[in-house]
Amino acid sequence: MSAWPPHRLSALGWTLGFAAVSLVPLAACLAALDPQARTFDVLAAASLGLLAAVAAAAFLARRLERQLDAARQESRFLRRQILSLGKLAAIGEMAAGVAHEINNPVAIMMEEAGLVLDILEDDAPAAPGDQAEIRRALQQIRTQGARCKDITHMLLPMARKTDDARTAVDLSALAGEMASLSERRASHAKVRLVTDLAPDVPPVSGSAARVQQVLLNLINNALDAMAPEGGELTIATRRAGEGGELLVSDTGHGIPEAVIDQVFEPFFTTKARGKGTGLGLSISAGIVREFGGDISVRSVPGQGTTFRVVLPAYAGQTLPAPAAAALPENE
């Protein structure tokens, strides 16, 4: 049985009830026309019909309620799964650039470690100059190790299970971190990455890991929009009233005016077939709106696109995670 909307089922119950009640005056009329009729039996039948109609409506309402509860639970589960898949897809797009970011300091550490080993394996007593060289090499290893640690520190919150509680988020700091992580990929894509991060942006309300995901989705989209020619990607933050504003702009091919209103819909994409999931912008819109913010897009075909995210100021109190709504729902 297909589930009916609650208002339709309620209307059905009332209709059946009134239909049954209408049998009562009908029974009275029959009794008046035929004195021999058993009026009591007719009234009893009408009453039983009324009770049966009400019982049927109650049964259907309860059944519908269970169906709706199950559908809501399944919807929440699927939304969480889609959010996780979207996050992993975004991280995967950035993986090559991150690998290069880590590969460079690792190569330096290996080279410096090899130099230290060569000095220590020399049978001749270590000269003062050798000791200074060892000290310099070890300091370089330490510096490059710290660089690797910083990179993994930025990545780990994105990969682990997300804490959706609303806390204070430093929008400019997060934008700077994501710009650093994306710089290598941008370089390989012949894209000049520019940041314009205002120092006076107040803490905004959100989840750092979720805002990172929004940033990553917007950056990846911008880089894809400029392929293969390259161009310029600008990441900017600024104060917006009491809250903060994030702008991600590219000089790519732009979005056609005929479809720009669809960019935040699930599974919509302007990318080539087989490239992208069509969920990045939809997920980003859901995240921003969960935290009471707004996301919009402005594009000129042939010149580029700018995505604007506005988040409200942090109210000074950690709030529980909002209800799962990773994707905007179509009414």
Image (spheres, rainbow, N blue to C red):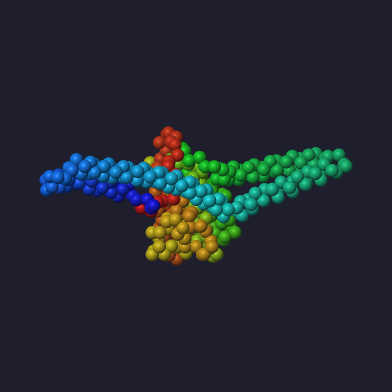
Counting from the top left corner in percent of width and height, residue 310 is at 41, 47
Q: Which residue is drawn at the image coordinates 40% and 59% (left, top)? A: 262
Counting from the top left corner in percent of width and height, residue 241 is at 37, 43
Residue 317, quarter of the rendered image? top left
**Residue reaching furthest to the top:** 317
Q: Which residue is drawn at the image coordinates 39% and 48% (left, top)? A: 294
Counting from the top left corner in percent of width and height, residue 142 is at 68, 41
- Comparing 113 with 1, the one in front is 1
Residue 134, quarter of the rendered image? top right
Q: Which residue is drawn at the image coordinates 45% and 63% (left, top)? A: 254
Question: How many numbered dots are placed on residues in this image?
Answer: 0
- Comparing 2 with 316, the one in front is 2
Q: Is residue 256 above or below residue 315?
A: below
Q: Is residue 220 above or below residue 245?
A: below
Q: Does residue 155 appear anywhere in the picture?
A: yes
**Residue reaching furthest to the right:** 123
Counting from the top left corner in percent of width and height, residue 159 is at 57, 45
**Residue reaching furthest to the front:** 36
